[in-house]
Every structure is written in structure tokens, then in C-alpha cells.
């Protein structure tokens, strides 16, 4: 790595301006040219700059000595993205931390911070993931293209988990474009693009990217990713209301998991199988599957969607007491986990269940839920607009109803009729 980039990175890390670094050593234009690699620094000036930045000459001139460490970090990053993290990933990260502790090279430090961001996203720890992504973002011009693609991938995952699906799509596309230009593997990005498109109800696009990813993972016999892709294809069939195709997909997937004795995905499979039966109207077949999923899932946030599907199923079966029980459990858990996407869904289901929509609920849906979904998921936002129109019409508030019907017509530019809300 050029000397100038090491100097620039360390200066910014210490919160120094070019002017403050130059004081007593050289001119500001000299610093600027050095950082832009437009000149080779004199040894005496470089020594003074290093002293001010707590660097050694070896730090700035020996950055290429860490290729093995950089390779190890890239390998760890990919293993996490491919859902195949080293069983001792925590120890591996500690070892990498010790290896880079005294390294001044920006590419090493930034790669390490990006690895930590991806690790915390894998662990669903939002705050540290955000902090490390923010640190890396400050130095994007210093990243080589492969690391830059990794940054956009991690940023896409962060937006998918905690922000906007549209922004997630934007970040993943940038990552895919860079990796394609570098002729590097893009299957893990293709899968994420399939996932985001599915959540935005862009089913054709989702199928395209998911099948692309599946072709690669079948060749590599990457079982976790093969399961992920097939699960997503089943979800897409369900969203297209092709329930028989979805059920067939899940039953084939169940055989694969039994063959490999893999219990890790059992809860998700049972949930999706039960969800599909319920949407088909086969409640007696579907409810036991979703209950089994609820019992199997160990990670609390993953239970929320099963509580939601059960509340809908019991509502359709006219078992109000059971439906309310799952609704209230879902509201409590979604608030605890800060999952407002499902919190508002539970409120809507409860409103239709009790057939007694109070003014404060309509206010909550208008002032909180509508802006939330507008930022997070345009498909659910459009659907909520139509729900509000129906609710206001039902309560004879025709001016408000007309407003939301018009908004829905203007915003709904697709022929998608798949429902994200169950009520």
C-alpha cells in the first residue's frame, strides 16, 4: 500500500487535519500531494510525520508484509456470508485481532473492521455492526475493489435487517457489479438479491437471482445454502398463491434435511409448510406444523412470525380466544425485540379480529406504521394504504377513505396481489 494512504488513514483516525499535521514539519500542499501519492516523501519529513502519528518507518513502508493476514480475513468474511462460519469463529477473530493490533496499514485495519461488522450482523448485534460499518465508510477511497464490494454487501445486509429494503437492494447491486467486474463469485450476493426482491414482492426477479445462486451451490454441494435457496423458492410459490407447488417444494426439502440429519432448519421448514397449508385454507393440517415450528425455534425473534401466522389461523377458525392469546404474545415479543414490522401487523390483526377499531389505533397506523413501512418496505406500505382506506370506509369516514383509495391507485404500479398482512 502506498505510503501516502497509510499517512492519510492514520491522520484521520487521530482526528487531525492536514494543516495540524503539517505544523512544524512541512507545508499543507506537501501533505496533500503525499496523501494523493503525487510525491515520494523525503526521509527526514517522513520520520517527523511518523513521530507525530505514532508510526514507525516500517509501519508505512512495510504494509505489504501482511498479505497472509488479509487473506485470512477475507476467508473468514466469506465463511460468514456463506453460512459456513468456522466453529471456532470467536477464537479466529481473537487471533486476527492480535495479528492486526499493531498494524498501521489501512487495508488491514479496514478489512478487520469490515469483518467485525459482518460478524456482528451474523450475530444480529445491530449497534456494533453499525459502528464498524460507519468507521469503514469514512475511508471508502482507501479500499481496494474487493473489500469495497464486501462493504456494500455488509451495508446491504444491515439495511435488510434494520433499515430499508429498497436501500438494501441498492447496496447489493453495487456489490454484485464490482464482483462481476473482478470476475469473482457472486452467488452469495445473488441469494441476498433474491431474498430482498421476494420481500418486496418482486417475485420474478427473486426467482431469477435465487435460481442463479442455487445452480452454484448445487455444484459446490453447499447444503446450508441449497436449503436456503429452496426454502426461498417455496416462499415465492406461496406468495404467487401456487400453494401446491410450494408444499411440494417444502416436502422435497424435508427429505433432504432428513437425509443429512440436519435439525438446524427444521423450525423454518415447519413454519413455511404450515403457513402455506393455512393460506390454502387447510387449518387442521397447517396449525400443528406452525406450533411445531414455535416449539423448535430457539432464537426468540424467529418465533414472532410463527405467532403471527397462528393468530391469523385461529382468527379464520373463529377461535377468538386462541387468536388473541397469540396476538398478545406476539405484541409483547415484537416490542421486546424492537420488531416494529410485526408489531404493527399484530395490531392490524387484532383490529380486524375484534371488529372494533378505535381512533387511537387508526392514529397509530397513520402516524407510526405508515411512515415506518414507507421507509422499510414499499410493498407493505402500499398494502397498508389500502387497509386504511377499507377501515375508514367501514367506519363511514368517506373523505379519509377516498384519500387512501386514491393514494393506493397512484402508488400501486404493479399487478402484484400478494398479501404481506394477514387479517
Image (tube, helix red, strand yellow):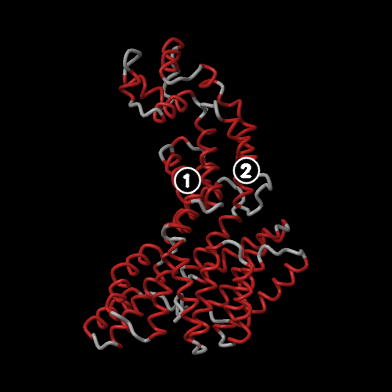
Q: Badge 1: how crowded within 10 Å, few (<14), some, or many (20+)?
A: some
Q: Quadrant of the C terminus?
A: bottom left
Q: Is 248 situated above or below 299?
A: below
User: Residue 200: percent from the left, percent from the top?
Assistant: 46, 68
Q: Residue at 25% x, 88% y: name it.
A: 396
**How many labels were placed on the picture?**
2
| Secondary structure beneath label 1 | helix
The label shown at residue 90 is 2
Q: Residue at 40% x, 26% y: name it.
A: 11
Front residue of 414/371: it is: 371
Rendered image quadrant of residue 346? bottom left
| Secondary structure beneath label 2 | helix
Front residue of 88/59: it is: 88
Disc 1 target residue: 128
User: Residue 167: percent from the left, percent from the top?
Assistant: 42, 57
Q: Is 270 situated above or below 355?
A: above
Comes first in the chain, label 2 or label 1:
2
Q: Is 11 situated above or below 239?
A: above
Q: Is 288 situated above or below 188?
A: below
Q: Badge 2: how crowded within 10 Å, few (<14), some, or many (20+)?
A: few
User: Residue 118: percent from the left, percent from the top?
Assistant: 54, 47
Residue 205 appears left or right of 221: left
Residue 149 appears left or right of 66: left
The label shown at residue 190 is none
Amino acid at each position: 500500500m502506498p505510503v501516502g494512504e497509510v499517512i492519510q488513514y492514520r491522520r484521520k483516525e487521530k482526528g487531525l487535519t492536514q494543516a495540524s499535521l503539517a505544523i512544524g514539519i512541512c507545508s499543507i500542499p506537501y501533505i496533500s500531494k503525499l496523501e494523493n501519492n503525487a510525491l515520494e516523501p523525503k526521509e527526514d519529513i517522513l520520520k517527523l510525520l511518523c513521530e507525530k502519528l505514532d508510526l514507525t518507518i516500517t509501519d508505512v513502508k512495510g504494509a505489504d508484509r501482511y498479505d497472509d493476514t488479509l487473506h485470512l480475513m477475507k476467508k473468514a468474511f466469506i465463511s460468514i456470508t456463506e453460512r459456513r462460519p468456522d466453529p471456532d469463529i470467536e477464537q479466529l477473530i481473537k487471533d486476527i485481532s492480535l495479528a492486526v493490533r499493531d498494524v498501521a496499514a489501512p487495508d488491514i485495519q479496514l478489512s478487520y473492521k469490515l469483518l467485525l461488522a459482518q460478524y456482528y450482523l451474523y450475530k444480529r448485534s445491530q449497534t456494533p455492526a453499525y459502528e464498524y460499518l460507519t468507521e469503514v465508510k469514512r475511508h471508502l477511497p482507501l479500499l481496494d475493489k474487493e473489500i469495497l464490494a464486501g462493504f456494500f454487501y455488509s451495508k446491504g445486509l444491515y439495511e435488510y435487517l434494520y433499515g430499508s429494503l429498497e436501500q438494501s437492494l441498492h447496496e447489493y447491486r453495487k456489490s454484485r457489479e464490482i464482483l462481476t467486474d473482478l470476475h469473482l463469485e457472486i452467488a452469495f450476493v445473488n441469494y441476498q438479491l433474491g431474498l430482498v426482491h421476494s420481500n418486496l414482492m418482486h417475485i420474478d426477479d427473486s426467482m431469477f437471482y435465487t435460481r442463479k445462486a442455487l445452480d452454484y451451490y448445487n455444484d459446490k454441494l453447499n447444503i446450508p445454502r441449497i436449503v436456503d435457496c429452496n426454502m426461498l423458492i417455496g416462499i415465492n410459490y406461496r406468495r404467487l398463491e401456487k400453494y401446491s407447488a410450494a408444499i411440494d417444494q417444502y416436502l422435497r426439502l424435508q427429505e433432504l434435511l432428513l437425509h443429512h440429519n440436519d435439525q438446524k432448519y427444521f423450525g423454518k421448514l415447519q413454519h413455511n409448510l404450515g403457513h402455506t397449508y393455512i393460506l390454502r385454507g387447510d387449518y387442521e393440517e397447517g396449525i400443528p406444523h406452525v406450533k411445531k415450528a414455535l416449539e423448535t425455534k430457539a432464537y426468540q425473534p424467529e418465533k414472532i412470525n410463527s405467532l403471527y401466522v397462528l393468530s391469523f389461523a385461529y382468527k379464520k377458525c373463529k377461535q377468538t380466544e386462541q387468536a388473541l392469546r397469540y396476538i398478545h404474545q406476539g405484541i409483547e415479543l415484537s416490542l421486546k425485540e424492537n420488531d416494529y414490522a410485526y408489531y404493527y401487523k399484530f395490531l392490524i390483526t387484532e383490529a380486524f379480529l375484534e371488529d372494533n377499531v378505535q381512533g387511537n389505533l387508526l392514529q397509530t397506523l397513520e402516524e407510526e406504521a405508515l411512515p415506518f413501512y414507507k421507509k422499510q418496505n414499499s410493498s407493505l406500505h402500499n398494502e397498508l394504504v389500502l387497509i386504511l382506506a377499507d377501515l375508514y370506509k367501514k367506519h363511514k369516514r368517506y373523505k379519509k377513505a377516498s384519500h387512501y383509495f386514491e393514494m393506493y391507485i397512484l402508488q400501486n404500479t404493479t399487478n402484484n396481489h400478494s398479501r404481506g398482512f394477514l387479517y
